[in-house]
Amino acid sequence: MSKRVKHIYKFGPFQLDLEQQKLWKDEEPVSLPPKVFETLVVLLERHGMVISKKEMIDLLWPDRYVEEANLSQNIFVLRSKLESDGDTKYIETVSKRGYRFIAPVNEIVKEVGPIIPAPPEEGASEIKEDTKKALGRHHTENPEAYRAYLKGRYHRNQHTVEGYAEAIKSFEQALSLDPDYAMAYSALADSYVTFDFYGVLVPLETGPKAKAAAINALRLDDTLAEAHLALACVQMMYERAWSEAEREFLRAIELDPHYAHARNWYSHFLMAMGRIEESLTQSELALKLDPLDESINQYLGWHYIHARQFDRAITQLEKTLADNPDFYLARVTLGRAYVQRREFRKAVSELDKAIQANRLPVVLGFLGHAYGMAGQRGEAERILEELQELSEQTYVPPYSIALVNTSLGRKDEAFEWLDKAFAAANEWLNWLKLDPALDSLRSDERFKQLLIKLKLQPDD
C-alpha cells in the first residue's frame, strides 16, 4: 500500500513544503506567484550547483518560448522575498552561466501515515542516508513518474485553461511510467473536475474519466484523502449523488483533518444543499489551513455571492486579485458580484478583462447576463448569438445560454436551456437552489420541477 511522504526544504528562517507547495518564514506564510515558487523549487533541488539559464527556462516553461527577462524577473522577486533583511544571500548570479542557490539547505523527507501526524519533535530534522533513500519514493519508486507528477501539480496550480490541460497530460504521463501511482490517479481526477468549471470539456465525457481515475486511486490506496475527495467531487458534480458525495467528503476530512481542499470542496457541496452556515464554516476552515491558496480565497467570495452578502464578496475578491491580478476565475467571480450589486459598469469591466485574457463560452455567458441586466439588450443579443453559433461547433455550457436568456426576460428559452443543462450534467446547475442570477425564474413552477429533478428539493 502506498504511503504518504512529506518533502521539506529548510534554509535560514524559511521552510518550503513541496507537497503543499507553500513557503513559510518563521511560521508565517510567504506569498509567491506559482511560477516564482517553481523557480525556487528548481534552485533548491540543485542547491550548490550552477543551473544554466537555458535549463531553467526549459524546466519552467516547457514547450513554450519565453525571453530570459521572464526568468530574471522571477529571480528578482525571489531575492526581494528571501533577502529582504539584507544580511543573508541565497541566490548567486554566476556570470555568463546561470544561477546557484548558495545558502545551506536541510532537505527532509519523511514518511507519514494517512492521518495528519503530530508535529515533529525538536531535533528530528536529520535523517543519515539509507533511511532517506528508503523514504524518498514520493508514492512511486519511479523518479521520472514523480517528476511528471510534480510538473502536473505546477501546471494545475496556475488555475488556467492551459494549466489544467497541461496538468492532465503530465499526470497521464506519470501514470504511463507507473500505473500503480495512486496520487497521480487522484490528481488526474481532480484536474478533470476542476477543469470542467471553465466549461471547455463535455461533462458527459469528463465525468467517466474523472470517476475511473478516482476509483483507481482508491483501489491502490483507500486511505488516501485526496482520492476520496476526487470521488466525492465526481459524485457531486456529475452524478448528483448527494448522500454518497457527502459520505466521501467526510471520509476525506476524517483521513486528513488539515486537508484544506477537502474542506473547500465540502463547502461547495454544503452550498448546493442550501446549508449556508455550515458551508461558511468549512470555507473559513479551509482558508485558515491554507491562507495563501488562490482558489480557496476566490471560493470564499463565491460563497458570499450565493449567501447574498455581495459587499463581502466584492471585498474578498478584490483582496484575492490584489495578491494575484492574473487570477482569471477570481476576476470572473468579481464581475458576477458586481452584477448583483447592480454596479453594471464595473461588472462589464471585470468580465471584459477576463474575456480579453481568454474568450471562453462560460465567461461570455456571464458577460451577456451582465449586459442584459444592465439593459444593454443589443450587446446581450450579440453575445447570445455568438454562444448559439459556438454551440454548433464546440461544447458550450447550456447554463451559459440559459443565463443570457434569463437576463433578457425570456423565460421559456431560459428553461429550455436549463433542461439541456440538466441532461448534459452541466455542473453550474448544481447551485440552482441559491444562485441569485436566476432569481427571476424562481416563482415559475418549472423552477421547482427542475429542483426536484436535481434532487435538491423533495417531490411533494
Image: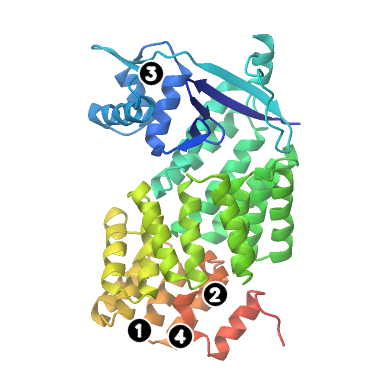
Which of the two discs, 1 and 2, sits closer to the camera?
Answer: 2
Neighbor class of circle 3 (other Cα within 10 Å; few <14, some 14-19, many 20+) is some
- Between 158 and 103, the residue placed more toward the observer is 103
- Disc 3 to disc 4: CB gap under 8 Å: no
Q: Which residue corresponds to the image point at 65% horizontal and 80% vertical from the top-left?
A: 452
Residue 440: image tag: 4
Q: Is residue 32 above or below residue 13?
A: below
Which badge, 4 or 2, comes first in the chain's sequence?
A: 2
Element assignment for label 3: loop
Q: How many marks?
A: 4
Residue topped by disc 1: 408
* Type of amino acid at the residue the image marks with label 2: Leu
Distance between the Cα atoms at labels 3 and 4? 58 Å
- Between 323 and 3, the residue placed more toward the observer is 323
Residue topped by disc 3: 90
Distance between the Cα atoms at labels 2 and 3? 50 Å
* Type of amino acid at the residue the image marks with label 3: Tyr
Distance between the Cα atoms at labels 1 and 2? 20 Å
Residue topped by disc 2: 434
- Locate the N terminus and report the quarter of the image it occupies: top right
